[in-house]
Amino acid sequence: MIGDRVGMTVAADLSANVFAAFLLILIVLLARSGTPEPATRPAPIEASRDLDTRTHRPEAPAGLVELLRLRGPAAPGLTVDLHAERIEIGIPGRRTRTVLALAGIDQASAAARIAAATLLAEPGAVRLYVFDAAWYGAVTARLVRDGRSWRELSVPAALRVGGQANGAAWAPAFEALVARSADPGRFRAGLAEIIAGSGGERVDRPVPGGRNGGGLDGSPVQGETLSERLGRYGRMILALLAVTASLALVIYAETRRPSRRRT
């Protein structure tokens, strides 16, 4: 009897230790599934060596508002809108804007086309409105080569079409405001209404393509390959099997104790 009790005590302690080990394995697996390590360590990037950088003084808030007001057709100097696939250049007194279509061409051809744009050599102020920075380096390199200075602004989501960060054009409400509001005070008030979302463009919409979902609930993670998804599901199944086996071992050890006592 004493030997049986000692044996069952040892078995119960052993099952508890095994259960604790399985729980530790489960925690490690869940932690690794949440933050997968890269297969190779990326090489460090030196900004001054590996990137095409430009030093430019940022605009003050009042200067940004004034820069937006000068987007109108009556403002002196050039207005240049930088997009991912095109560059739009506006000259005072012209209703239409010159468009350099750069979709589907390489960087060298695009740089040559930008260098051939005599509009950039027009005298007067230059204002850059950046929707996408794909051609920012080529345009600013041309301006630096010509000894020109410029003012620039990254177009906020509230002023883009649809009120979205990936909007590739000016919001209609902002275009209408620029066309009719030459007075700085009225322009500031109208701009505040648009940014607040009451000027005809909603600015509280979620940006599509965000990284949402994914995790222990089984929902897919955007950008996840099939092998990564199968690996994540496999780790989840292994963790569940580990917990089930540990509980089964504990239940078996506990149910065996009274049967040995009756004998």
Image (cartoon, rainbow, N blue to C red):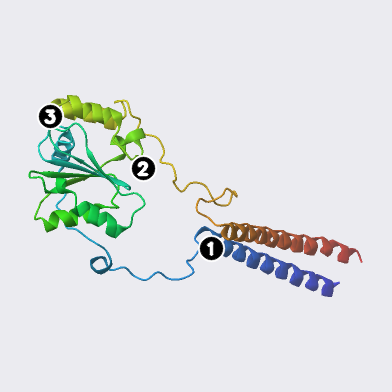
Q: Secondary structure at mark 1?
A: helix
Residue at 13 percent across and 45 percent down: it is 126
* Picture coordinates of residue 141, whole percent (x, y): 18, 57
Residue placed most toward the observer, 12 or 99? 99
* Picture coordinates of residue 4, whole percent (x, y): 84, 72
* Picture coordinates of residue 254, whole percent (x, y): 78, 61
Q: Which mark is residue 184?
A: 3
Of labels 3 and 2, earlier in sequence is 2
Q: Are marks 3 and 2 in contact (CB under 8 Å)?
A: no
Tag 1 residue? 32
- Determine the CA span between mark 2 and mark 1: 32 Å
Q: Which mark is residue 14?
A: none
Q: Amino acid at mark 2?
A: Asn
Please identify, in this view, whether the residue under mark 1 or under mark 3 is nearer the observer.
Answer: 3
Q: Secondary structure at mark 3?
A: helix
Residue at 83 percent across and 75 percent down: it is 3
The number of numbered discs placed on residues in the rendered structure image is 3
Residue placed most toward the observer, 180 or 25? 180
9 up-or-down from 155: above or below: below
The quadrant in which residue 73 appears is: top left
Question: On the rendered image, what quadrant is the C terminus found in?
Answer: bottom right
The quadrant in which residue 208 appears is: top left
Q: Amino acid at mark 1?
A: Arg
Instruction: Answer left or right for 234 relative to 142.
Output: right
* Picture coordinates of residue 154, whole percent (x, y): 24, 45
Q: Amino acid at mark 3?
A: Pro
Residue at 65 percent across and 65 percent down: it is 22
Instruction: Answer left or right for 94 relative to 30.
Output: left
